[in-house]
Amino acid sequence: MDDEGELKDSEEIKYFRETPVETVLGNHIFVLLQVAAVHLAQSPADLAGAQLVIDTVSAMLSAGGARLGEHVELFRSALAEVQQVYVRAAQTPKATTSASDAKREGETQPAE
């Protein structure tokens, strides 16, 4: 590995050592919710992609609970908003689903 790569790695490692885990996870939760929003904003909406992200964030919030820190309710509210957008997008005839989603008729709403 070159010196520049080692420097970057050491900066990243330092960041992860110094940053509280709940802060790192919170940042990732918001990035994931942005990913879901982008997939829902496509025309047509990518329901399968958005659902995967929504379900993953939901699982993270469920597993982490109060341990995610003082902003956990903000994370839950943001997830609820994205879920509402998902439901509206799923009611739009042009929304796309994957082949496996088409087989699971009736499972258009992500887990909460």
Image (spheres, helix red, strand yellow):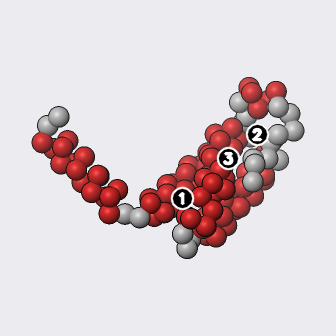
User: Badges 1 and 2: C-beta atoms under 8 Å apart?
Assistant: no
100 relative to 8, above or below = above
Circle 1 Cα neighbour tier, 10 Å, few/some/many (<14 / 14–19 / ≥20): some
- What's the CA distance linking mark 1 and mark 3? 14 Å
Which of the numbered marks, if any, corresponds to residue 94? 2
Residue at 73% x, 34% y is 97
Q: Secondary structure at mark 3?
A: helix
- Please name which of the two marks, 2 or 3, marks the residue nearer to the observer: 3
Circle 3 Cα neighbour tier, 10 Å, few/some/many (<14 / 14–19 / ≥20): some
Q: Which residue is mark 1?
A: 30
Q: In the rendered structure, which amino acid carries the disc numbered 2?
A: Lys
Q: Which residue is mark 3?
A: 55
Q: Secondary structure at mark 1?
A: helix
Circle 2 Cα neighbour tier, 10 Å, few/some/many (<14 / 14–19 / ≥20): few
Q: Is residue 33 left or right of residue 28?
A: right
19 relative to 57, above or below = below
Q: Which quarter of the picture shows residue 102?
A: top right
Residue at 49% x, 57% y is 25
Residue at 67% x, 47% y is 55
- Please name which of the two marks, 1 or 3, marks the residue nearer to the observer: 3
- What's the CA distance linking mark 1 and mark 2? 27 Å
Expressed as whole percent of the image width and height from the top left, the position of residue 38 reads 58, 49
For the C terminus, the image quarter is bottom right
Q: Is residue 53 left or right of residue 107?
A: left
Q: Is residue 109 left or right of residue 55?
A: right
